[in-house]
Structure formats: C-alpha cells, structure tokens
Amino acid sequence: MRKSVCFLLLSIMMTGCGKLSRSEAEKIIKKDFTENPSAVYFQINSLVGSHSGINKDVCDKLESAGYLKRVKERHGFFQGDFLMPNDEKSPFMREDNVLKVKICEKVFDHITGIAQEGKTTAIVEFTWKYDNFQPAYEIVKPAAELKQPSPIKYVMTKYDDGWRLGR
C-alpha cells in the first residue's frame, strides 16, 4: 500500500498536473521569438521628387548622415533622381523603387494570462515591446509609425515530452 501511494505521488510530480506554468510558457515563447525574430522596417520611395513634409526632411537627413546618395537613373521613358544606399555598409536595402531599413525588433515582454483548456491545451496571452533599435531609427523616428504593442495569444499543446507551441 505504501509503495502504491509513493508511486502515485512520484508519477504526479513527474508528469505535473497538466497545467502550464508561466515560467514554462515564457521559456517557450522567448525561444520562438529568438528563433523567428520579428524585425520592423521603415520604407520610403526611392524617387526623390515623391517626398513631401516629414518624409522629405527624413530623406534629407538620411542623405546628410551618409546613409543614402542621389543618383540619376532611367526607368523606361522616365529619368530622374533616385535615392540609393550609399555603400555596401549602408543598412538600407532597395527593392524596386522602395528603400527599406530595419529600425528595431519586436521582442517578448511578459505573460498577461494563461487559460487552461483541459489537460493538454492552454491559451497564453502575452505582450511584446520594441527593442534593439538601430542607429538609423533616430533619423527616421518622426516618420516611422510604430503602433502601440497589442497582446498576442498563442495556443500551446502538451505532448508526452512537454508543452509546445500549437502551429
């Protein structure tokens, strides 16, 4: 009888009660954010005459700071001044007529709640924040529209080897 009770208690401790802890959920989410980084980009048209207001000021500052340079290019029947990355070290990338630069990343912030649904499913709600700001961000900040972070929900499923993100 005593062996049975000890075995029962040991098996409950080893398998847990099926509940996902905040620390375990946080570990899984942080791993996912690390393996699948979410970069935030600022984009602007490379055609010089297409900018006005804040975007014109930002382009002028990016050019003055040495990130971008003006070049004359011909596209079909159109010829004009375009902004290009200044050199290979420039963080800007050009895709067609759009210049884009990574300005920061979305990173995990904290868990706001866990809704357990049975023994093998849990919905984890968490918040994220902007971090790892790049040097170009200070220049594009007036034109970059960073939205207020909103909560995200992940579904997690318990397998024989532990909890995993449900994909």
Image (cartoon, rainbow, N blue to C red):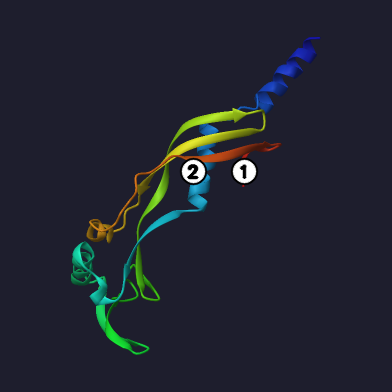
> Looking at the image, which residue sits at the far top?
1
Residue topped by disc 1: 166
State the SS at label 1.
Answer: loop
Q: Amino acid at mark 2?
A: Lys
User: Which of the two labelled residues, at mark 1 and mark 2, occupies the earlier sequence position?
Assistant: 2
- Residue 112 visible in the shown view: yes
57 or 77, nearer to the observer: 77
* Quarter of the rendering containing residue 91: bottom left
Q: Would you say 37 lies left or right of 157 here?
A: left
Residue topped by disc 2: 30
64 or 96, nearer to the observer: 96
Q: Amino acid at mark 1?
A: Gly
- Residue 21 visible in the shown view: no
Q: Would you say 85 lies left or right of 108 here?
A: left
Near mark 2 (Cα within 10 A), the count class, few <14, some 14-19 or many ≥20, is some
Q: Would you say 137 lies left or right of 33 here?
A: left
71 or 80, nearer to the observer: 80
Near mark 1 (Cα within 10 A), the count class, few <14, some 14-19 or many ≥20, is few
* Quarter of the rendering containing residue 149: top left
User: Relative to 74, is 154 above or below?
Assistant: above
155 or 134, nearer to the observer: 155
Where is residue 134? Give x, y as percent: 31, 57
